[in-house]
Image: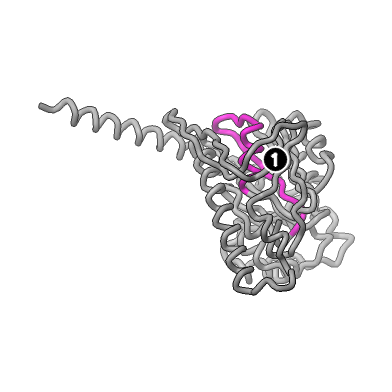
Amino acid sequence: MCTTCGCGAGEVRIEGESAHHDHGHGHAHDHVHADGTTHSHDHDHGHEHGAQHSHAYPHDEAAQHSHAPGVSPRRMVQIEQDILAKNNAYARENREQLAGHGIFALNLVSSPGSGKTTLLCKTITMLGAQPLAVIEGDQQTSQDAQRIRATGALAIQINTGKGCHLDAHMVGHAMGQLRLQDDSLLMIENVGNLVCPAAFDLGEAHKVVILSVTEGEDKPIKYPDMFRAASLMLLNKIDLLPYLSFDVAAAIAFARQVNPQIRVIQVSATSGAGMDEWLAFLREGLAAAHRARHETVDQLRQRIAALEAQLQRP
């Protein structure tokens, strides 16, 4: 699936979908805009109907040839450029759909064991009645989606098989299954990996990287692409600091060495420390998405009114 690490093209399954997708010919998806208009986008995959939804994604060629003898570096660069171009096109469609409905979407990224799901469950509980949905990404099992649904939130699981990250095409399909509410929050919990998800735009407003104090404080300089791509770093599990030798100042300094603009919030889902600041970040993003949606609708109405006025002139 990925030219960065050469992982295999596993069978991707999205909960609730009944179509077996075997990419070979066009398939259209309807997108609804803020003004109520609907149009279709052709996706390069075909159908066979079955019990599960599996994808052979457009970047399978890279999976088959990554690190393979006889494939030139120039060809590998071309394959990677093609993969990212296709992904970015799907990401633009996702972003357009999210913006049209005032949905604030975040892509949560981290290494395995950082506490993403626990933090997410705590966040959902503290947000209360806020409409939200979660897309869970893991190679196998639906355990994390089940944990999310136990909080009362809407969640869908994507299993990537041998794949090491979510991509915009998978997320677009999951969004369609979720039937997202207007002016809601969408949290995308990516596959645990600090390398490949950095390169793949999903259509989110921000990447949020979660670094646990049980990891090394030098993670940001070991995996700079991820921390450079993120807008926010959540320094998680700070309730454990008294029992560790983790250097908080060094971790933040390393993060800002690779990304001077990154915001840092220190949090603990266990003690509740820092959670108010994290929730304030979410509410600010939700309010901005809501304003942008309604400003867009108002602008469209103004343009329509201006056109109608022109048509009525003698």
Secondary element at tag 1: strand
Residue 272, can we see it? no
> Dot 1, how many residues are within 10 Å of its Cα: few (below 14), some (14-19), or many (20+)?
many
Where does residue 300 sit, x and y in percent of width and height?
Answer: 35, 34
Comparing 267 with 295, the one in front is 295
Q: Which residues are magenta?
A: 168-193
Viewer-proximal residue, 176 or 274? 176
Q: Is residue 175 a member of the stretch shown in magenta?
A: yes
Q: Residue at x 73, y 36 (%)?
A: 156
Nearer the observer, 58 or 314: 58
- In the shown orientation, is residue 33 left or right of residue 146? left
Q: Quadrant of the C terminus?
A: top left
Q: Residue furthest right?
A: 243
11 within the magenta span = no
**Circle 1 sits on which residue?**
135
Residue at left offset 44%, top offset 28%: 36
Residue 121: image location, x then y, percent: 77, 39
- Where is 14 relative to 250, above or below? above
Q: Nearer the viewer, residue 163 or 272?
A: 163
Q: Can residue 141 be seen by looking at this rendering?
A: yes
User: Which residue extends farthest left?
Assistant: 314
- Which residue type does callout 1 highlight? Ile
| The image quarter in which residue 306 lies | top left
Where residue 76 sits: x, y (%)? 64, 68
Q: How many marks?
A: 1
* Residue that appears at 64% across and 45% down: 23
Q: Residue 118's spot in the image, x, y percent?
A: 80, 44
* Image color mode: one colour
**195 shown above or below 101:** below
Q: Residue at x 54, y 39 (%)?
A: 98
